[in-house]
Amino acid sequence: MAQDATVTLKFTTVNSDLNAGTLSRTLQEKFVYTGQQGSQSNYLDLETMTSRLTKQHLVHTLLDAGADWALAKDILRRCDQYIRPVAEKRLYRPGADQIVLHGGLYFLNLWQQPKVVPDCDVSAEPFVNHLVMALGSEEKADYLLDALALRFQMSAETAKPHIAFYLYGEAQGQGKSLLAKTIRQVFGDSAIRIVPSADKLKSMSAVDMWRRTWLVTEETEVKRGSELYDTIKSYTGMDRTESDRKNTHFDTYEIPAQLIMLSNNVPSFIEHNDRRFFVSQWDTGLRGDEKKAYFDDYISWLESGGYEAIAGLLQTRSIANDMYREALITKEKLQAQNLASDECTDALKALLRYIPKNTLFLPKDFYEIWEEHNVKGNQKKHKLAAAGLKKITGRVQIEKERLTGLWMFEEVELVTEKGHVPRVELQTEQFVDAIRYDPHVGL
């Protein structure tokens, strides 16, 4: 009984400083109307982003604010006059409020204020030096810095540059993923989407990934002429697209994100007339204990004011490069363009066209092609990959010989079981014995 009396007292005691206008503004600032479910109105709490709330939830907000039952019910009878109705689709408006007005309609803003506050009084020199070391030149570092600064400074209405970035390096632990984390910290969680592989861009809801400032793909592998390549090229060159994203109707969506692709491999999809892609190797050149010591110090700097310093640099940086022109030409891009389509790759493809898919190769099997096209050293593995082969990790026993460094067709899988001949899975549950290619006697 004592508990009931306490509740009754709370409901009937009204703060004399409160009035209907103040309480109405409390509801207006905290909730938006999202639609009807039957005869029930639904609301969204902007603070917790809790959806499908009803007036039963709203009334308790008023009671907690000090209203009595009568005043709370009277306010709720008129709440549709001041609680804003939001459209189902969301917009991305960096720097704008949580609710944005566009075309006479209210929309929820996908962008949220980042936690990192720019600090222009702290030097961001460690970050600049890090980019110079990893990219290999001041010119490339300045280009990436200008790209980051432009997006940090630009308003929501400014069109994105139609440039994508491809950063690659075979050596592990060189900080490519740390770059993505740094962008996330500086721009805020809502401004970047990081996905584990570029294949995710082929999903029905891929358009959602492009509705940010930055889209980063890790473990990137793109083939020239593939569906994935066409998607990347199209989304990089457009500011909006039509999409039938999963569980929604066909609609038009803004796609403000610029793409940053992180990979261990030289790109083999860059066309000779390409204007969209900035390509650079990413390698600090550090190894072993020296690398560990460097990154320990660098990460410590980031976490003790470095992110704020980077934000301050991007906020005040004077942008020298014209990011709306053709992407900066690098030696890596020229090499990639040559790799994407050259006589050597075409010769490999022509040879492989008639060879069974269960065949395994060693690079030396293509000796005549290497000699004819003067291909040396590490170039061989890039040519093989461009021709549609992939390297097999570990040893494989073929005809009493245990071999390493074998290659096979990319579209099939190798199955090895102890005591059994290695097999190749051509289709689901369809296996054939693996065979070795002999360039002297044929197959």
Image (cartoon, rainbow, N blue to C red):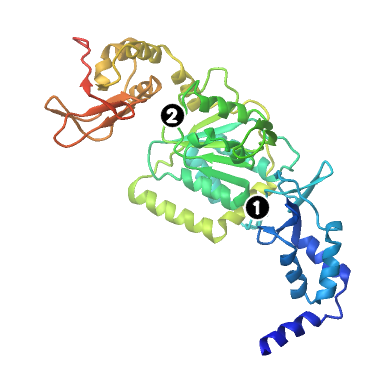
Where does label 2 land, which residue? 266
Q: Which of 269 and 205 is in front in this view?
A: 205
Mark 1, other Cα within 10 Å: few <14 / some 14–19 / many ≥20: many
Residue lying at 66% horizontally and 29% vertically, measured from the top left: 238
Mark in front: 1 vs 2: 2
| Residue 300, x across and y down, in percent | 48, 58
Question: Which residue is rendered at x = 23% and y = 28% of the image?
Answer: 423
Picture quarter with the N terminus: bottom right
Q: Which residue is drawn at 63% across and 58% down?
A: 115
Q: Can residue 194 be seen in this view?
A: yes
Which of the image's four quarters has the C terminus?
A: top left
- Residue 328 locus on image (x, y percent): 59, 28
Viewer-side residue, 146 vs 10: 10
SS category of the residue bearing label 1: helix
What is the secondary structure assignment of the residue under circle 2? loop
Q: In this view, does 96 lie above or below 53?
A: above
Q: Which mark is residue 146?
A: none
Classify 10 Å Cα crowding around label 2: few (below 14), some (14-19), many (20 and above).
Answer: many
The correct choice, above or below, for 41 with respect to 67 in the image is: above
Q: Which amino acid does label 1 sit on?
A: Gly
Q: In which quarter of the image is residue 192?
A: top right
Q: Which residue lies furthest to the left in this view?
A: 400
Residue at image mark 1: 312
Query: Which residue is painted at 76% across and 52% down in the image?
Result: 99
Kindly indicate the quadrant of the structure image that contains residue 354: top left
Q: Where is residue 343 in the image (x, y as percent from the top left)?
A: 41, 11
Of all residues shown, which one is farthest toward the front? Answer: 38
Which comes sooner in the sequence, label 1 or label 2? 2
